């Protein structure tokens, strides 16, 4: 074929092995692209068969070709844009052919060249289903292949075939003016009657596991245990790589300070750029672990069971069983969590989930809590084995979760929507984890976090460094090392301007600076504190804490009393301090109205709650 | 008879779907007249319920299942 690059689009239902096949065909050469102007993400991978280069575009798994929302309309454009795809590679779960062929039949209706691959034949075989491939090829008029996307069996043969010219299916799934769902299903049934035989019917293990996973008592206990394992890993396991990263950056700063000549450039590099980058990278272990577990739960099919058993409870407060995934992911990062609300079909359910997810304690709040807890809460043991600091940390997570559930009830009341909520969801059969997919997913999502959050935090760090290092008077440079001069820097001025408004919460102008910078991203708090209290030292938790603890009010009392620290923690728990999240909410809701409401309600909630906490403990 | 009226394990054939905002979604998921359906799993509190649809398991709330009209297979064969 005398063409530069073949364009092949991969399509199929959810849970049919599409990602596995994509990974098998493209290996590591893939990237995620955003369909311009939408939230739809297409993965693009490249591979070659001999001289022929092939571009493989993955599309989101869906049950039908039925663009309803604006986004879905954009998503299907990939099938019709210029240049048109050379082939649609359709992957179907052989054990579930009737429903899998429905989306196929809708694509076939558009007369595009197609190849059909059948996956999960082992399960079809177990179910006693036999498929006559030759007959299926003849009836459809296109190539049909058997593969095992998990092991890669059959994919090398498929690769070489993909370089060839493909055919348009001539099977009539409907007629000129009759393309109703019933007609298509009717045609599929007729096709399958000719090409498949069901020999026996055996019960799958899935049904037996489900007896436990959805049990009224055991089911919830199991879910709770899973959550405990995940959070234990996030806190305990991640602390090792986080220590390495911290040490690594500390060594790197020392190296830089030895190499670079003294002056503003050196300070910009060490205290602005390196500190900023370190602030992002430090979160990667926690986020990666959370993404890993989320991927594992989704891939094995357990997450669908969690949605199934949680639906009834969440329905009462305006959410749905499908809100479980976003809410849990919100404990890692609200950005991917909000993106994962796309599989909630009902707009109101989805909107409420989007609005309340940022109240879940994301990992960016973690370093803020860690620093503050270590300052004000003694590390004493309760009942002999429960660490008080850990207990307070847990309480912050519970606080975030309760707040998001309460907020959901309020939004359920306020938001009006005509289309009633519904919950129609496949319970996929259980799979052993497909590690490659899970790692790939974990890697790509962590990487995009570093890129997205990194941009913002880096800019903020540099701007902050400038604001803290320079003051308005005579363009004089201030050395921040001696604290009094920070008062006269730009940052100090800003802090003082807002001081009257945050005084009722127990905050001084230094905290004011941190609040301002944190409106870009919460984790900037720690960096800001280190800038304010120890600009020339490399970021060191212990040192920041010591210096903060020594800071006193005019009357000699410490600035960071228990009341102030608790008030500050509650403020960070509720306030909308993440520009990236607001940007994602705008993208997902296609309107500035919702991010604006979110910003106002969360900040108001934070202000009032902090005020209450400060006055109760003060 | 409605889908919600079947007991766990009882097999029926879908005869029609009532008009509803989710009718199309049900059809896309394979709830089509003529298809065999069997309730297999009840979530805690009795809602939603998972149904075996010939080839796979679909879960839905009772409100959705109420709109699906079914005809049980031979009642003698199905009695507990």
Image: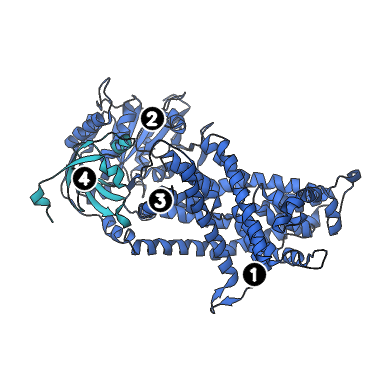
Chain colours: A blue, B cyan
Chain to which the residue tagged by mark 4 belongs: B
Q: CA distance from mark 3 to mark 2?
A: 46 Å
Q: Nearer the viewer, mark 1 or mark 2?
A: 1
Provide residue A354's location: percent of width, then percent of height: 50, 44
Which chain does the residue under circle 2 lie in?
A: A
Res. A557 image quadrant = bottom right
Residue at which label 4 appears: B37
Q: Is residue A157 left or right of residue A286?
A: left
Q: Please name the residue shown 43% across and 55% down the image.
A: A296
Nearest to the eye among marks 3 and 4: give it.
3
The quarter of the image holding the C terminus of chain A is bottom right
Figure check: A268 above or below A225: above
**Compared with residue A11, is residue A385 higher up or lower down, i.e. above or below?**
below
Q: Nearer the viewer, residue A392 or A237?
A: A392
Residue A512 image point, x, y percent: 74, 53
Residue at mark 2: A87
Mark 1 sits on what residue?
Answer: A377
Question: Mark 2, residues whose alpha carbon is within 10 Å: few (<14), some, or many (≥20)?
Answer: many
- The residue at the point 74 percent across, 58 percent down is A530
3D distance between C-alphas at marks 2 and 4: 35 Å
Could you say which is closer to the camera, residue A38 or residue B10?
B10
Mark 4 touches mark 1? (CB < 8 Å): no
Secondary structure type for disc 3: loop
């Amino acid at each position: 074929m005398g063409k530069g690059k073949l364009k092949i689009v991969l399509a199929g239902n959810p849970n049919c092995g599409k990602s596995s096949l994509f990974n098998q065909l493209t290996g590591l050469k893939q990237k995620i692209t955003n369909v311009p102007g939408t939230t739809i993400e297409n993965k693009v991978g490249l591979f070659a068969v001999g001289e022929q280069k092939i571009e493989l575009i993955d599309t989101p798994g869906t049950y039908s070709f039925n663009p309803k929302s604006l986004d879905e309309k954009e998503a299907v454009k990939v099938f019709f844009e210029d240049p048109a795809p050379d082939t649609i590679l359709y992957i179907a779960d052989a054990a579930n052919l009737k429903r899998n062929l429905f989306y196929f039949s809708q694509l076939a209706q558009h007369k595009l060249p197609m190849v059909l691959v059948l996956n999960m034949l082992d399960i079809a075989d177990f179910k006693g289903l036999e498929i006559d491939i030759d007959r299926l090829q003849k009836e459809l008029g296109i190539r049909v292949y058997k593969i095992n996307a998990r092991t890669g069996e059959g994919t090398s043969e498929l690769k070489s075939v993909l370089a060839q010219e493909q055919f348009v299916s001539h099977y009539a799934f409907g007629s000129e003016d009759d393309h109703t769902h019933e007609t298509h299903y009717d045609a599929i049934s007729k096709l399958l009657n000719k090409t498949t035989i069901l020999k026996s019917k055996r019960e799958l293990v899935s049904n037996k596991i489900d007896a436990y996973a959805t049990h009224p008592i055991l089911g919830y206990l199991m879910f709770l245990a899973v959550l405990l394992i995940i959070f234990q890993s996030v806190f305990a396991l991640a602390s090792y790589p986080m220590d390495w990263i911290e040490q690594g950056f500390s060594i790197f700063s020392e190296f830089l300070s030895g190499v670079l000549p003294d002056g503003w450039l050196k300070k910009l590099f060490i205290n602005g750029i390196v500190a900023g980058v370190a602030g992002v990278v430090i979160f990667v272990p926690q986020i990666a672990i959370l993404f890993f577990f989320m991927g594992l739960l989704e891939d094995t099919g357990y997450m669908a069971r969690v949605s199934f058993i949680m639906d009834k409870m969440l329905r009462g407060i305006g959410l749905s069983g499908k809100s479980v995934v976003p809410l849990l992911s919100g404990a890692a990062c609200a950005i991917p969590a909000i993106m994962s609300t796309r599989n909630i079909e009902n707009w109101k359910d989805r909107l409420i989930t989007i609005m309340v997810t940022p109240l879940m304690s994301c990992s960016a709040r973690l370093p803020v809590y860690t620093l503050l807890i270590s300052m004000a809460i003694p590390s004493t043991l309760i009942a002999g084995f429960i660490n008080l600091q850990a207990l307070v940390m847990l309480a912050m997570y519970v606080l975030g979760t309760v707040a998001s559930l309460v907020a959901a009830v309020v939004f359920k009341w306020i938001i009006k929507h005509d289309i009633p909520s519904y919950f129609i969801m496949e319970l996929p059969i259980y799979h052993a984890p497909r590690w490659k997919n899970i790692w790939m997913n974990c890697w790509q999502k962590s990487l995009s976090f570093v890129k997205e959050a990194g941009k913002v935090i880096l800019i903020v760090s540099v701007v902050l460094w400038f604001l803290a290092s320079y003051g308005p008077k005579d363009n004089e440079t201030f050395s921040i090392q001696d604290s009094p001069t920070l008062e006269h820097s730009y940052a100090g001025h800003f802090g003082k301007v807002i001081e009257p408004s945050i005084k009722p919460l127990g905050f001084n102008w230094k905290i004011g600076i941190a609040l301002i910078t944190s409106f870009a991203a919460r984790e900037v708090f720690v960096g800001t504190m280190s800038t304010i209290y120890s600009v020339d030292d490399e970021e060191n938790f212990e040192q920041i804490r010591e210096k903060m603890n020594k800071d006193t009010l005019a009357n000699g009392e410490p600035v960071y009393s228990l009341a102030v620290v608790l008030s500050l923690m509650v403020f960070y728990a509720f306030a909308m301090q993440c520009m990236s999240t607001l940007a994602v909410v705008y993208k997902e809701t296609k309107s500035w109205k919702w991010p604006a409401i979110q910003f106002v309600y969360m900040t108001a909630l934070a202000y009032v709650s902090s005020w209450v906490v400060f006055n109760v403990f003060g | 008879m409605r889908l919600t009226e079947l007991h766990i394990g009882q097999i029926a054939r879908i005869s029609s779907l009532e008009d509803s905002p989710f009718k199309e979604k049900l059809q896309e998921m394979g709830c089509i007249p003529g298809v065999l359906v069997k309730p297999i799993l009840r979530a805690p509190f009795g809602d939603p319920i998972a149904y075996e649809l010939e080839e796979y398991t679909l879960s839905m709330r009772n409100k959705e299942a109420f709109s699906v009209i079914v005809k049980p297979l031979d009642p003698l064969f199905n009695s507990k």
